Image (cartoon, helix red, strand yellow):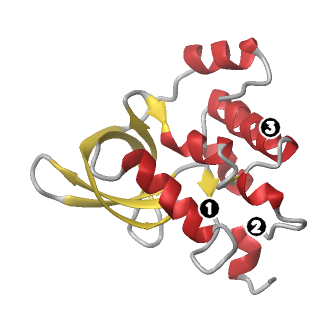
Protein backbone atom coordinates (compact mmCIF):
# COMPACT_ATOMS: atom_id res chain seq x y z
CA UNK A 1 0.00 0.00 0.00
CA UNK A 2 1.39 3.36 -1.00
CA UNK A 3 0.91 6.38 1.25
CA UNK A 4 1.74 9.90 0.18
CA UNK A 5 3.28 10.50 3.56
CA UNK A 6 3.82 8.89 6.90
CA UNK A 7 1.70 11.72 8.31
CA UNK A 8 -1.35 10.48 6.38
CA UNK A 9 -0.95 7.02 7.87
CA UNK A 10 -0.47 8.42 11.36
CA UNK A 11 -3.52 10.65 10.95
CA UNK A 12 -5.60 7.65 9.88
CA UNK A 13 -4.58 5.73 12.97
CA UNK A 14 -5.35 8.61 15.31
CA UNK A 15 -8.66 9.76 13.80
CA UNK A 16 -10.99 6.79 13.65
CA UNK A 17 -14.66 7.38 12.88
CA UNK A 18 -17.38 7.04 15.49
CA UNK A 19 -19.49 4.33 13.89
CA UNK A 20 -22.94 3.44 15.14
CA UNK A 21 -22.67 -0.33 14.60
CA UNK A 22 -20.07 -2.99 13.95
CA UNK A 23 -21.41 -6.01 12.14
CA UNK A 24 -19.35 -9.23 12.22
CA UNK A 25 -20.03 -12.03 9.77
CA UNK A 26 -18.94 -14.14 6.86
CA UNK A 27 -19.06 -12.83 3.29
CA UNK A 28 -21.36 -15.22 1.41
CA UNK A 29 -21.99 -13.32 -1.86
CA UNK A 30 -20.81 -10.46 -4.03
CA UNK A 31 -23.04 -8.48 -6.37
CA UNK A 32 -20.19 -6.51 -7.93
CA UNK A 33 -16.97 -4.70 -6.99
CA UNK A 34 -18.55 -2.65 -4.21
CA UNK A 35 -21.49 -4.66 -2.85
CA UNK A 36 -21.32 -7.79 -0.70
CA UNK A 37 -23.64 -9.94 1.41
CA UNK A 38 -22.57 -10.75 4.96
CA UNK A 39 -24.11 -13.55 7.02
CA UNK A 40 -23.99 -12.70 10.73
CA UNK A 41 -23.84 -15.08 13.70
CA UNK A 42 -27.65 -15.20 13.87
CA UNK A 43 -27.78 -16.35 10.22
CA UNK A 44 -29.20 -13.01 9.08
CA UNK A 45 -27.97 -11.72 5.71
CA UNK A 46 -26.90 -8.09 5.37
CA UNK A 47 -26.40 -6.42 2.01
CA UNK A 48 -23.40 -4.09 2.36
CA UNK A 49 -22.42 -1.28 -0.02
CA UNK A 50 -18.77 -0.39 0.51
CA UNK A 51 -18.54 3.18 1.82
CA UNK A 52 -16.42 5.82 0.15
CA UNK A 53 -15.85 3.99 -3.13
CA UNK A 54 -17.55 3.30 -6.44
CA UNK A 55 -16.32 0.37 -8.52
CA UNK A 56 -16.92 -0.04 -12.25
CA UNK A 57 -20.30 -1.48 -13.19
CA UNK A 58 -20.32 -5.15 -14.23
CA UNK A 59 -20.55 -4.38 -17.96
CA UNK A 60 -18.03 -1.57 -17.74
CA UNK A 61 -14.32 -2.12 -18.46
CA UNK A 62 -12.72 -3.54 -15.29
CA UNK A 63 -16.15 -4.27 -13.77
CA UNK A 64 -15.56 -8.02 -13.67
CA UNK A 65 -11.97 -7.53 -12.53
CA UNK A 66 -13.17 -5.34 -9.64
CA UNK A 67 -15.61 -8.04 -8.54
CA UNK A 68 -12.86 -10.68 -8.74
CA UNK A 69 -10.50 -8.54 -6.65
CA UNK A 70 -13.12 -7.90 -3.99
CA UNK A 71 -13.91 -11.63 -3.96
CA UNK A 72 -10.24 -12.42 -3.48
CA UNK A 73 -10.10 -9.98 -0.56
CA UNK A 74 -13.25 -10.98 1.34
CA UNK A 75 -15.28 -13.90 -0.04
CA UNK A 76 -15.76 -16.70 2.48
CA UNK A 77 -13.94 -14.71 5.14
CA UNK A 78 -15.09 -13.19 8.41
CA UNK A 79 -15.26 -9.42 8.20
CA UNK A 80 -16.05 -6.55 10.52
CA UNK A 81 -18.26 -3.91 8.91
CA UNK A 82 -18.39 -0.43 10.43
CA UNK A 83 -21.78 0.95 9.41
CA UNK A 84 -24.10 3.77 10.34
CA UNK A 85 -26.29 4.37 7.30
CA UNK A 86 -28.77 2.57 5.05
CA UNK A 87 -29.09 3.67 1.43
CA UNK A 88 -32.25 4.07 -0.63
CA UNK A 89 -31.94 0.44 -1.79
CA UNK A 90 -31.93 -0.89 1.78
CA UNK A 91 -28.21 -1.70 1.80
CA UNK A 92 -26.08 -0.87 4.80
CA UNK A 93 -23.22 1.45 3.88
CA UNK A 94 -20.01 0.40 5.58
CA UNK A 95 -16.29 0.14 5.80
CA UNK A 96 -15.31 -3.53 5.46
CA UNK A 97 -12.35 -4.67 7.53
CA UNK A 98 -10.63 -8.02 7.00
CA UNK A 99 -7.99 -8.81 9.60
CA UNK A 100 -7.91 -5.09 10.40
CA UNK A 101 -7.28 -4.15 6.75
CA UNK A 102 -9.66 -1.72 5.02
CA UNK A 103 -11.02 -3.62 1.97
CA UNK A 104 -12.65 -0.45 0.59
CA UNK A 105 -9.30 1.33 0.57
CA UNK A 106 -7.61 -1.75 -0.92
CA UNK A 107 -9.96 -1.56 -3.92
CA UNK A 108 -9.00 2.08 -4.56
CA UNK A 109 -5.31 1.29 -4.08
CA UNK A 110 -5.54 -1.53 -6.64
CA UNK A 111 -7.02 0.89 -9.16
CA UNK A 112 -10.32 -0.99 -9.22
CA UNK A 113 -12.55 1.66 -7.66
CA UNK A 114 -12.85 5.41 -7.52
CA UNK A 115 -12.85 7.35 -4.30
CA UNK A 116 -16.54 8.34 -4.31
CA UNK A 117 -16.11 12.03 -3.64
CA UNK A 118 -19.84 12.76 -3.80
CA UNK A 119 -20.11 10.99 -0.44
CA UNK A 120 -16.76 11.91 1.09
CA UNK A 121 -18.45 14.17 3.66
CA UNK A 122 -19.76 10.95 5.24
CA UNK A 123 -16.21 9.67 5.75
CA UNK A 124 -13.88 10.53 8.58
CA UNK A 125 -11.31 13.18 7.66
CA UNK A 126 -8.61 10.49 7.89
CA UNK A 127 -10.44 8.19 5.47
CA UNK A 128 -11.08 11.07 3.05
CA UNK A 129 -7.36 11.79 3.01
CA UNK A 130 -6.33 8.14 2.64
CA UNK A 131 -8.84 7.31 -0.11
CA UNK A 132 -8.05 10.46 -2.12
CA UNK A 133 -4.32 9.78 -1.81
CA UNK A 134 -4.79 6.13 -2.80
CA UNK A 135 -6.69 7.16 -5.94
CA UNK A 136 -4.00 9.70 -6.86
CA UNK A 137 -1.31 7.04 -6.40
CA UNK A 138 -3.23 4.45 -8.45
CA UNK A 139 -3.70 6.99 -11.25
CA UNK A 140 0.00 7.90 -11.16
CA UNK A 141 1.14 4.29 -11.61
CA UNK A 142 -1.73 3.48 -14.01
CA UNK A 143 -3.00 0.65 -11.83
CA UNK A 144 -6.13 -1.25 -12.84
CA UNK A 145 -8.73 0.86 -14.60
CA UNK A 146 -6.29 3.76 -14.82
CA UNK A 147 -4.61 1.88 -17.71
CA UNK A 148 -7.60 2.91 -19.83
CA UNK A 149 -6.99 6.07 -21.90
CA UNK A 150 -10.23 7.68 -20.63
CA UNK A 151 -11.90 5.65 -17.87
CA UNK A 152 -15.57 6.51 -17.35
CA UNK A 153 -16.62 6.89 -13.73
CA UNK A 154 -19.47 4.54 -12.73
CA UNK A 155 -21.79 7.42 -11.79
CA UNK A 156 -21.38 8.74 -15.36
CA UNK A 157 -21.75 5.25 -16.85
CA UNK A 158 -25.06 4.80 -15.03
CA UNK A 159 -26.29 8.06 -16.62
CA UNK A 160 -25.46 6.67 -20.05
CA UNK A 161 -22.14 8.45 -20.68
CA UNK A 162 -20.29 5.57 -22.32
In front of the other: 15 or 34: 34
SS at mark 3? helix
Element carrying mark 1: loop
Residue contact at pointers 3 and 1, CB within 8 angstroms: no
- Label 3 crowd (10 A; few <14 / some 14-19 / many >=20): many
Give percent across and percent down for residue 161: 81, 83
Q: Residue extending furthest left?
A: 42
**Earlier sequence position, callout 2 versus callout 3:** 3
Residue 133 seen by the camera: yes
Which residue is rendered at x = 75% and y = 39% of the image? 132
What residue is disc 2 on? 153
The CA distance from mark 2 to mark 3 is: 17 Å
Residue 8, position in %: x, y? 72, 20
Residue 104 is labelled as none
Side of 29 relative to 12 (left or right): left
Q: Is residue 75 left or right of residue 12?
A: left
In space, the residues marked 3 and 1 are separated at their CA atoms by 17 Å
Q: Label 1 near label 2: C-beta < 8 Å? A: no
Q: What is the CA distance from the residue labelled 2 to the residue labelled 1?
A: 8 Å
Residue 21, percent from left and from top:
33, 39
Question: On the image, numbered disc 1 is attached to which residue?
Answer: 55
Residue 33 visible: no
- Which is in the foreground here, disc 2 or disc 3? 3
Decide: is 134 above or below 148.
Answer: above
- Precedes in sequence: disc 2 or disc 1: 1
Q: Position of residue 40 (x, y in %)?
A: 18, 49
Q: Which residue is mark 3?
A: 137
Amino acid sequence: MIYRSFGALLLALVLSPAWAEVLVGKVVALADGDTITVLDGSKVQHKIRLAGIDAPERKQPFGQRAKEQLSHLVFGKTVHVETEKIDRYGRQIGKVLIDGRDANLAMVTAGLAWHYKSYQAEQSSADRLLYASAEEDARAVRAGLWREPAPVAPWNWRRGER
